[in-house]
Amino acid sequence: MTCDGPKFAGLQLEGLELRQGDFRLSATLAIPAGARVALIGPSGAGKTTLLSAIAGFLPPSAGRILWAGTDIGALPPGERPLSILFQDQNLFPHLTVGQNLGLGIDPRLRLSAGDKVRIGGVLDKVGLAGMAARRPAELSGGQQSRVALARALLRGRPMLLLDEPFAALGPALKDEMLALVAGMAAEKGTTVLMVSHDPADARALCPETILVAEGRALPPQPTEALLNAPPPVLRAYLGQRHTER
Amino acid sequence: MSGPRIEARIPVAFPLAGGSAALIVAALILVPLGAVTMTAGGLRAPSPADLEALWFTLWQAAVSAAVSCALAVPAARALNRRRFPGRTALVALMGAPFVLPSIVAVTALLTVFGRKGLVNEALGALGLPSVGIYGAHGVILAHVFFNLPLAVRMILHGWQAIPSERMRLAASLGFGPAEVARHLERPMLRQVLPGAFLAIFLVCLTSFAVALILGGGPRATTLELAIFQAFRYDADLGRAAALALAQVAVTLIALGLAAAVTAPPAFGAGLDRAGERLIPTGRLRTAKDATVIALIAVFLLVPLATVLTGGAGQIPRLPASVWHATAVSLAVAAGSTVLTVALALTLATAGRKWAEAAGMLPMAVSSLVFGTGLFIVLRPLAPPAMLALPVTLIANALMSLPFALRVLLPEAKRLAADYDRLAASLGLRSWARLRFLTLPRLARPLGFAAGLAAAFSMGDLGVITLFSDGHQQTLPMAIYAMMGSYHQNLAAGAATVLTAITLGLFYGLDRIGRRSDDM
């Protein structure tokens, strides 16, 4: 890809090098806008680290991160064209559901009447109509995940990074969340990157998968083919059950 | 969690504020100290009396801190797991002896443990020999009286900071008291106790009024008392400066030790569910907890009750000058509280070791050394009497700062560890971050810190004695003057007023913080 060619519509990692002590991870890959991609690999391979770098929490030691041809490496996390859902701590417990959502519209919480209508609208959309005044502790785990997703919906950023936010939910609830994500992404053309330990999640949501292993994040490849004929390092991680269908 | 631990690159809320606050505090401490040193003409060889004062200072501070912490652990544990009528009031009153003006508190101890106090009257009635309170053990008794409640409060805060999710997890795993202690309580204590020990050690290092009244002589003179004597009686600024520098060195070593032994926080965040406690049942454990709580309550409350009942009748007879001094004290306390809280919050949320160090720096300088240094610096610029109240306000704010910072820091670190990433990912910055994240999450320790600062300022009798020509009076100074002119009854009445206002301010501000946190 050259500089004077047409701009690539999507996320590009160019010669990205991440280092933390002895840990090393390199990545050169491109993800087209609107794609849904899973990150799979052994524990400790650096899936979360890669997501953190893209989100702006970890400065790369070399390389560039581009969105739609523009280097976003210098932007603070809140100004990057993405929303991220962490494994936990996705909501402020002292703020109401409505306030937590309002932060997605304006971090200073200066909300117009129209903004409040929008908040009510997304709550309705994720099945939590009328719960704006509640606090996170009054909600179930699945409902908390829905609030975090609703906030991402309000922010309307073109990328959504999921760092196993649904890991604590039951299979049915998790499938429900994945379906919600798929619907949201399809509606807005959102690019989704999802860390997952469960190959079934990848199969359900992500047509393509990035294998993160042995210090490298490989370019996306078709999920089904990768999982059906995994390379040795992935086979060792997945075990027999998930590879023989 | 896959991959290594993420070291977040997250900007602090106000990048310049932490550095500015640290610089202001450092300048306010180091410039007066430099002025004292220059006036003294450099260091001189310590005399045997100086070395004895140094040794006694270290010894009494270590013993006072160790005894306070050792007694505070069972007391805090009992208070954390038991609920009984009056518990809230008792926990709030736990702050009382520590924030009680020292002149009032020592008088209160004398009414109980003094020559004609309650204890000796009881011993005499039983035909037993009387016990003395003067000397090294009296100094330690007074320091434990002042500091035990602080230790209880700090450790209780630590217990309450264990997320209720962890306690529920422990309950679900069938943990008994031993397992809870091993997996939850001891890690918390390892985190909280060094801070508590250090805070008390440092209070006792610069203890002045206690040593002045209960100590003295070659066996029980602290560095602080020696500095005062060199200043006021011998006018020997050189010796005072040498003693002051020794105290700075001792404090910095203590700070370094504490930084080395404090374990990093390891508890995850909870979701603020209503508190869940593991309550050991059984008559023996209940009786043990009840005994601990009763003993602590008697030790702390009886002297206080004696002061308040003794002086209350005198209040209608107090002259107008006392009420004027009361108004002055309140104004100074309001200003110094705002200054302390603003500085402590800025330094605690800066997320930098040097900001913490700057905030602890006032510990190295006693009130009198600070005042003398400022006196030397400001004397050419304006008449000292004109500056008495502004200087007192700043001095009180600086002397409270390390305590406020100690209270805020653990919670501020937890806040950063739990919510920095989320706040950054949402672009929550500067004032919005302060308003929607920092202030609500830190309401409880902020209220406690503000209460401490207000009470310290109300009760302070230090810098103003150097600057005032007698016309600018705070309430403690008015009491001191009345005691000196043998108006003991009026002094007791004014002491009751001072006690009531001081405790009222402390209790009120602490309560505001706790109520905001509960909301």
Image (cartoon, coloured by chain):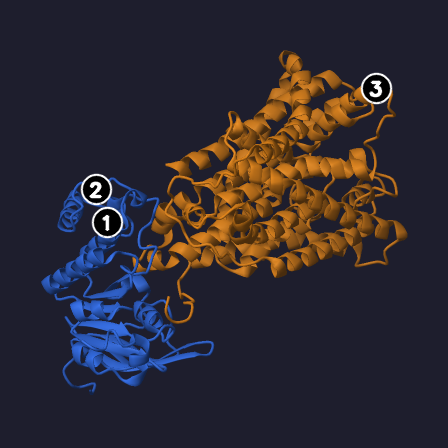
Q: Position of residue B110 (x, y in %)?
A: 76, 26
Is disc 1 on the same chain as disc 2? yes
In the rendered image, the vertical position of residue B65 relative to residue B474, given as above or below: below
Type of residue at label 2? Met
Along the horizontal axis of the image, is B272 left or right of A135? right
Residue at point 75%, 18% (across, down)? B487
In the image shown, does A153 or B243 lie closer to the viewer?
A153
Residue at point 58%, 53% (across, down)? B190
In the image shown, does B219 or A45 lie closer to the viewer?
A45
Type of residue at label 1? Gln
Element at label 1: helix
Which of the two discs, 2 and 3, sits closer to the camera?
Answer: 3
Q: Which residue is mark 2?
A: A131
Is disc 3 on the same chain as disc 2? no
Element at label 3: loop
In the rendered image, the vertical position of residue B238 relative to residue B115, given as above or below: below
Residue at point 55%, 44% (across, down)? B404
Chain rendered blue? A
Chain rendered orange? B
Q: Which residue is mark 3?
A: B126
Q: Which residue is mark 1?
A: A143
Q: For residue B282, which quarter of the picture?
A: top right
Q: Residues within 10 Å of mark 1 (few under 14, many from 20)?
A: some
Q: Quadrant of the C terminus of chain A?
A: bottom left
